[in-house]
Image (spheres, rainbow, N blue to C red):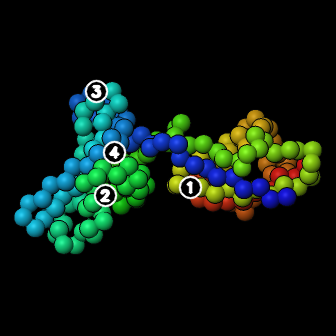
Amino acid sequence: MLENWVVMPTCLPLVLRRCHTCASERFRASGKFRVNANHKLIDAWLLALCTACGETAKLTVLERMNVRSVRPELLDRLHDNDLGLTAELLQDPVVRRRNRIALDWDNAWRLDTGGSDHLDREVSDVIDVSVRFAARIPVRPVRLIAEGCGLSRAEVERLITEGKVVSAVRLSGKLSGDFTFTLKR
């Protein structure tokens, strides 16, 4: 029996970066952009607000780029403050590296198990589960398995050590890419 699970974002993650005003570590992406053109060069920033004091930080999206080299669709999305573009840019490793930020996904995602609250353990002895990530959200597989199967994390750890939960990927640590596992009863 094959089950398909999806890890889906429910909202934008918090941006981890130090605030220069109050020394807080968390910013909330506002979904708004600032675009500035100087003759033929353009700059664009994603605005983020400090969760503690409300100070605005600018995350560089475009820096001193020739206007003609920027796709018109991207410019339209920047001018329209497209929330989808905000999510895409926060996921972009180039933007994160350039701005020296990390993302905090706590309480910003959910596990969709396809309608069932947890796997029916009495129906089948072997259950194959395919986990797909709708966005690159780092989550511990043990947490996903526990939530999807209605088990405690300690019980999932015990099942892994007993060899009753097996996967081609390492189930300790965090994953943000698709994987499959098999639960043997």
Which sits earlier in the primary sequence, circle 3 or circle 4? 4
Dot 1 alpha-carbon crowd within 10 angstroms: few under 14, some 14 to 19, many 20 or more: some
The three-letter code of the residue at mark 3 reads: Cys
Comparing labels 1 and 2, the label whose residue is closer to the camera? 2
Sequence-wise, the earlier of marks 2 and 3 is 3
Instruction: State which tag comes first along the sequence, 3 or 1.
Output: 3
State the residue in front, 129 or 76: 76
As helix, strand or loop, the secondary structure at mark 4 comes to strand
Camera-side mark, 3 or 4: 4
Numbered disc 3: secondary structure: loop
Residue 184 lies, in percent from the top left, at: 87, 52
Amino acid at the residue labelled 2? Arg
Residue at the image position 24 percent from the left and 46 percent from the top: 58
How crowded pointer 3 is (Cα within 10 Å; few <14, some 14-19, many 20+) is rated as: few
> In x, y percent, where is residue 10?
53, 42
Quadrant of residue 147 within the rendered picture: top right
Query: Is the residue under label 4 in contact with that under label 2 (CB below 8 Å)?
Result: no
* Quarter occupied by residue 178: bottom right
In what quadrant of the picture does the N terminus appear?
A: bottom right
Q: Secondary structure at mark 1?
A: loop
- Which residue occupies the foreground of this view, 36 or 139? 36
Does the residue at mark 3 contact the one at mark 1 (Cβ under 8 Å)? no
- The circle on residue 53 is 3
Where residue 146 appears, as percent x and y from the top left, is 73, 41
- Kindly identify which residue carries mark 4: 31
- Of tags 2 and 3, which is closer to the observer? 2
Q: Is residue 60 visible?
A: no
* Image side of residue 13 versus residue 75, left or right: right
Residue 134 disc label: 1
Q: CA distance from mark 2 to mark 4?
A: 11 Å
* N-term-proximal mark, 1 vs 2: 2
